[in-house]
Image (tube, rainbow, N blue to C red):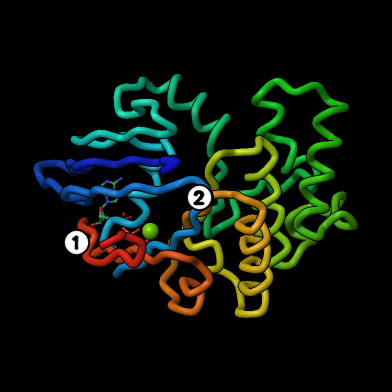
């Protein structure tokens, strides 16, 4: 089995004043390369917390996390930033694009951080925009694009570093159903091309695009269609 992610006993406790919030209460999860997983669960059940830990945006309070065999839970902030830049592509519910930058420049950003020279950057970013069907919108700013197009720019941006893992937290949450389907079509193509995808959604019809559904409640996995019995 070609393991990409291995989480064991992951707990996350947030302290707010004197109150402790147990956001994750012991998550065990293994993800193989090339899987397409949807995470579902009620609001506040810990989905985003789990995604942030998987995406190295946050660290667990307890537990062990191996990403491609590397013990991520032992890393410091700068090591985590490097892993994020090299291995992980993020897509957020609110797109998180730079409003003043056009589509091409938004997609180029991760490559700038990675120190890729300008001419190569432009080529890679143009190709990523082509993959999401937005080649003819490269000079548009986010405000000059539809919601679905903005999210496709965000997907292109998530792809330019050729990440091992694509994470999407409610990527269709701000889209109407037609734009949502367009975005899901791109995820389907990315999956068929061998990308590993984990997405969070509240919608069953969105989750049904994935090949495996993991249900979370109160910081625990209560159901996982992908666990071999
Ligand atoms: N930075 C934080 N500080 C303190 N508590 C937090 C923080 N982030 C999340 N929490 C708490 O942790 C729990 C899990 O939050 P999380 O954002 O993971 O839920 P979620 O499943 O993504 O919910 P939603 O579907 O509403 O996005 C919640 O009770 C939340 O209030
Ligand atoms: Mg959330």
What number is the disc on residue 218?
1
Q: Is residue 43 left or right of residue 119?
A: left
The quarter of the rendered structure image containing the C terminus is bottom left
| Residue in the image at 82% along x and 58% along y | 134
Looking at the picture, how far across and down is residue 190, in whole percent?
A: 65, 55
Looking at marks 1 and 2 on the same chain, the residue that comes earlier in the sequence is marked by 2
| Residue in the image at 65% along x and 66% along y | 183
Looking at the picture, how far across and down is residue 223, in whole percent?
A: 26, 67
What number is the disc on residue 167?
2
The quarter of the rendered structure image containing the N terminus is top left
Question: How many marks can you see?
Answer: 2
Query: How far apart are the two marked residues, 1 and 2, measured between alpha carbons?
Result: 21 Å
Looking at the picture, how far across and down is residue 12, in whole percent?
A: 22, 43
Q: Is residue 204 left or right of residue 98?
A: left
Above or below, comparing residue 116 to residue 68 in the picture: above
Above or below, comparing residue 198 to residue 84 in the picture: below
């Amino acid at each position: 089995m070609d393991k990409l992610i291995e989480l064991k006993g992951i707990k996350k406790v947030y302290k707010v004043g004197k109150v402790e919030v147990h956001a994750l209460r012991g998550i065990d999860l293994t993800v193989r390369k090339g899987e397409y997983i949807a995470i579902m669960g009620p609001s506040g059940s810990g989905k985003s917390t789990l995604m942030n830990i998987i995406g190295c945006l946050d660290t667990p309070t307890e537990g062990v996390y191996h990403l491609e065999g590397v013990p991520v839970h032992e890393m410091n902030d700068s090591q985590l930033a490097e892993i994020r830049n090299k291995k992980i592509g993020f897509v957020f519910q609110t797109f998180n694009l730079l409003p003043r930058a056009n589509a091409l420049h938004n997609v180029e950003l991760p490559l700038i951080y990675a120190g890729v020279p300008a001419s190569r950057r432009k080529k890679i970013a143009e190709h990523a925009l082509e993959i999401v069907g937005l080649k003819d919108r490269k000079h548009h700013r986010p405000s000059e694009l539809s919601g679905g197009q903005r999210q496709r720019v965000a997907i292109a941006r998530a792809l330019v570093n050729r990440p091992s893992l694509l994470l999407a937290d409610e990527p269709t949450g701000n889209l109407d159903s037609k734009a949502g389907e367009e975005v899901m079509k791109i995820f389907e193509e990315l999956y068929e091309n061998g990308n590993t995808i984990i997405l969070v959604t509240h919608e069953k019809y969105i989750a049904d695009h994935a090949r495996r559904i993991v249900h979370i409640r109160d910081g625990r996995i209560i159901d996982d269609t992908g666990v071999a019995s």
